[in-house]
């Protein structure tokens, strides 16, 4: 690799951070209980509500997204509770693991990786298990690139007094349409290092009034992730424990940019990039791994017959300076994932397709250089 | 306040971050599973062992210190266990609260705030409660400015096969002497935003081989803070969940500086600053709040008769741009705290004393301007 070559990050988190956020975080640090910090937290909170499309509080936790997921379980449920978990990938499995760690019995709806759950499956499982206190699901399963039909599932769960819908939107929020209030999503968890364009280290959680009623009754043990304490602190523009001040100051910048551009425009841009990449992949004779409901957040691609996907990501990184993601767990070596989420643009999509062409040719895959790029160009011209 | 006035942060966390760390964190973000990140984590780990003075692994968690404290409880104990907690301030209370949240019965040794626990009290309580699985204590109780006698307590606990010593060193590590291995400190918890000179968002935990045996038997619920998983990940220069990459990159810079200067020199410098401030405080006719074992980390000062400490911190901040800390919980309005930990120097100590003189005079306290500064100068000259 040319020693002056730039590095490009096109993995589904962490994603690149815009310079104005990097520079804001490089300013001298301020105290988390100071009057200077409170208006920053208030502004961030206001803008988070916009991105979450909710009127409810959005809690801000100093952890990565998984901490928010754990809190979503421990703050709403009690020992011995049952919960329905949609397991369609690594992160669905994570919901079940957290439930298991805390003595919540998970009723798993197992979906073949790469396929989508049907709302009827949720309805049926809820009928069979009316005692289930929660339905845990992903907005977007990062390991497979599948979007789950939250709106339809929200319609099913909303009238069940005894059940809340809990959504891991860590890789989804800010990149695809998520209407928290309108779709009756009771708990939505997000993270800083995806479409919100920040370094890892912040989790966000919104809760509906219905979810807060579950919080009141919840008796699972918790301390660091205590939503009741966080809500009280937030009312005073604070966090319960020390706030990750520099990340929150960076967040003010990225949320400002998101609001100026408009969430709908950002989502449309992701869709455009996604279409360009997916069209290019097909033009190159490759297969998109995601069988149903592929997301606009990333493109998961099957490695061609006889080529290890890890070889592809390795050459992309070592020879071309481009970090894309491999497959996780059972998909390791079988797929690679190109992210088009957050602070990335159409030129980078052309670049990654071109580098992928060169990589595959090096690995012996039969391909006329340029066919992928041409297909992507055509989408970008349309 | 002069609109061009600089702001100074002299509170016991978060503390100022050196420019080389701020700039390192402002660099484009890299992926937490990439080959570029692994040597950074390995280097940070090596230097953390130096600061912890341990040969054992130091786990790196994406949370603030309290998350590390929670993990220290949930990873070593089981439901119904008993533990001895030294409660000599707000953070001692936090240990008891975490135990309570997780169903661990705390046997509290209550110490008057501002005073120090005697090693004999620990020995006696352990004799009365040989079933206690852990002794929870602070290295430095940030709310009162008291240092606890860890070395002596380590001698007492080390031979109890059934009991570990768990130390909250969040505000202490890197600022005062803590010899993790030599003093038989089984679990030591630290945080990024104190003497390690970084923004909040990282917790660190070291565990002795004895503590790891407790981890094996522990059955309290945990998921995000899972020390076994973290240890396994660390062996591959990774973290179990997404690493807070930018903070860890900043940490590489601050640890490098700490190592270059030498821990013993840094501790001596803290002691020098502490002596200058404490001497100045007394010369001004004020009383140091800390009755026993005052630390070199901060100086806790009683507000003079008839003056609310919150008025003092307010004028210091609003008129002079200097953030010092007030009292916490029962000490609110009664004391204020000047930190001399981390990235601060002797000139700032002179400045804070001078501004404190002007503040107190404004509030009607009888004082000849300069007496505090003169006393501090004399210490700095000696």
Image (spheres, coloured by chain):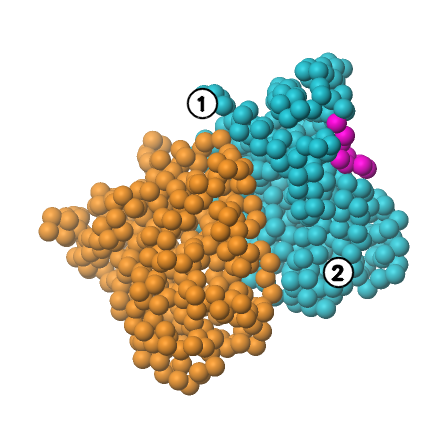
Chain colours: A orange, B cyan
Q: Label 2: state its secondary structure.
A: strand
Q: Categorize mark 2 by other alpha carbons within 10 Å: few (<14), some (14-19), many (20+).
A: many
Taking A265 as reference, is B10 above or below it? above
* Magenta range: B286-296
Q: Categorize mark 1 by other alpha carbons within 10 Å: few (<14), some (14-19), many (20+).
A: few
Give x and y (percent) for residue A12.
Answer: 36, 53
Of the pair A140 and A209, the residue shown nearer to us: A209
Number of marks in picture: 2
Give x and y (percent) for residue A296.
Answer: 26, 57
Chain letter belonging to callout 1 = B
Q: Quadrant of residue B275?
A: top right
The answer to whether residue A144 is magenta is no
Give x and y (percent) for residue A56.
Answer: 40, 58
Chain letter belonging to callout 2 = B
Q: Residue at x 65, y 21 (%)?
A: B361
Taking B336 as reference, is B219 above or below it? below
Is any part of residue A9 visible from this angle? Answer: no
In the figure, is residue A317 to the left or right of A372?
right
User: In the rendering, which numbered label is found on residue B106?
Assistant: 2
Q: Main secondary structure of the magenta part?
A: loop
Is the same chain shared between marks 2 and 1? yes
Q: Residue at x 43, y 56 (%)?
A: A57
Of the pair B222 and A254, the residue shown nearer to us: A254
Q: Residue at x 58, y 55 (%)?
A: A224
Residue topped by disc 1: B3
Give x and y (percent) for residue A46.
Answer: 38, 49
Indicate the quadrant containing the C terminus of chain B: top left, top right, bottom left or bottom right. top right
């Amino acid at each position: 690799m040319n020693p002056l070559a730039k590095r490009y990050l096109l993995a589904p988190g962490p994603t690149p951070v815009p310079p104005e956020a990097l520079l804001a975080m490089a300013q001298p640090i301020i105290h988390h209980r100071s009057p200077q910090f409170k208006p920053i937290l208030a502004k961030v909170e206001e803008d988070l509500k916009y991105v979450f499309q909710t009127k409810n509080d959005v809690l801000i936790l100093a952890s990565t997204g998984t901490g928010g997921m754990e809190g979503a379980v421990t703050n709403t449920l009690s020992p011995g509770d049952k919960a329905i978990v949609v397991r369609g990938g690594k992160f669905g499995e994570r919901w079940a693991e957290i439930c298991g760690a805390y003595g919540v019995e998970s009723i798993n709806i197992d979906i073949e990786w790469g396929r989508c759950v049907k709302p009827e499956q949720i309805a049926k499982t809820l009928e069979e298990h009316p005692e289930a206190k929660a339905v845990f699901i992903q907005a977007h399963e990062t390991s497979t690139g599948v979007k789950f039909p939250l709106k339809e599932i929200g319609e099913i769960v909303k009238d069940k007094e005894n059940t809340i819908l809990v959504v891991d939107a860590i890789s989804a929020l800010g990149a695809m349409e998520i209407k928290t209030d309108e779709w009756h999503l009771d708990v939505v968890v997000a993270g800083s290092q995806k479409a919100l364009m920040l370094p890892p280290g912040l989790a966000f959680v919104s809760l509906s009034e219905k979810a807060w009623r579950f919080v009141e009754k919840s008796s699972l043990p918790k301390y660091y992730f205590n939503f009741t304490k966080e809500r009280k602190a937030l009312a005073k523009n604070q966090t319960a424990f020390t706030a990750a001040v520099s990340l929150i100051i960076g967040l003010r910048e990225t949320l400002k940019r998101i609001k100026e551009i408009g969430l709908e425009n950002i989502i449309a841009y992701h869709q455009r990039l996604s279409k360009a990449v997916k069209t290019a992949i097909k033009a190159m004779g490759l297969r998109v791994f995601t069988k149903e409901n592929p997301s606009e957040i990333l493109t998961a691609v099957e490695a061609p017959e006889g080529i290890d996907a890890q070889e592809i990501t390795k050459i992309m990184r070592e020879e071309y300076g481009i970090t894309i993601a491999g497959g996780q767990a059972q998909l390791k070596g079988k797929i690679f994932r190109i992210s088009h989420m957050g602070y990335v643009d159409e030129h980078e999509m052309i670049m990654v397709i071109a580098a992928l062409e060169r990589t595959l040719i090096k690995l012996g895959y039969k391909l006329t250089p340029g066919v992928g790029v041409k297909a992507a160009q055509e989408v970008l011209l349309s």
